[in-house]
Image (cartoon, rainbow, N blue to C red):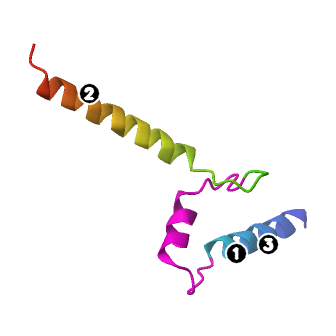
Amino acid sequence: MKRDAQTKEMRDRLAIYLEQDTGQSLTDMLRRMVEDPIRPRSEAERFRISPTLLLLGVLSAFSLGAFLYFSLVRP
């Protein structure tokens, strides 16, 4: 019986999370996509970016820098 209650609660939460508001602006939708899904807002209501996207951005910047360095600097 407990599993059914948990399943129903999880389905309700998922439906609320996936519910799309037609009145949202493009910036609100992008902010929600980039926001950390586990802890979207801190205690001070500051925006938190997803750690995965942050890591991807840092690695991309590092790779681009290394590519430009080895392409433009001739030994």
Q: Main secondary structure of the magenta part?
A: loop
Q: Residues within 10 Å of mark 1 (few under 14, many from 20)?
A: few
> Dot 2, how many residues are within 10 Å of its Cα: few (below 14), some (14-19), or many (20+)?
few
Q: Residue 26 colored magenta?
A: yes
The residue tagged 3 is 8
How far apart are labels 1 and 2 at the CA level?
A: 43 Å
Of label 3 and label 1, which has the lower sequence position? 3
Give the vertical position of 56 relative to 6 (above or below): above
Quadrant placement of the C terminus: top left
Query: How many angstroms separate mark 3 from mark 1 (CA)?
Result: 12 Å
Which residue is disc 1 drawn over? 16
- Callout 2 touching callout 3 (CB < 8 Å): no
> In the image shown, does 1 or 32 lie closer to the viewer?
32
Location of residue 22 in the rendering, given as x and y in whole percent from the top left corner: 55, 86
Name the front one of labels 1 and 2.
2
Q: Amino acid at mark 1?
A: Ile
Q: Which residues are magenta?
A: 19-41
- For the point 13% across and 21% down, the residue is 73
Q: Secondary structure at mark 1?
A: helix
> How many discs mark residues in the rendered view?
3
Circle 2 — which element? helix
Residue 24 percent across, percent down from the top left: 56, 80
Q: Which callout, 1 or 2, points at the residue further toward the start of the chain? A: 1
Describe the element under mark 3 as helix, strand or loop: helix
**Horizontal and vertical percent position of residue 45:** 73, 56
Q: Residue 68: within the magenta? A: no
Q: Would you name the residue on which mark 2 appears?
A: 66
Say left or right for 48 vs 2.
Answer: left
Task: Return the disc, 2 or 3, that comes first in the chain's sequence.
Answer: 3
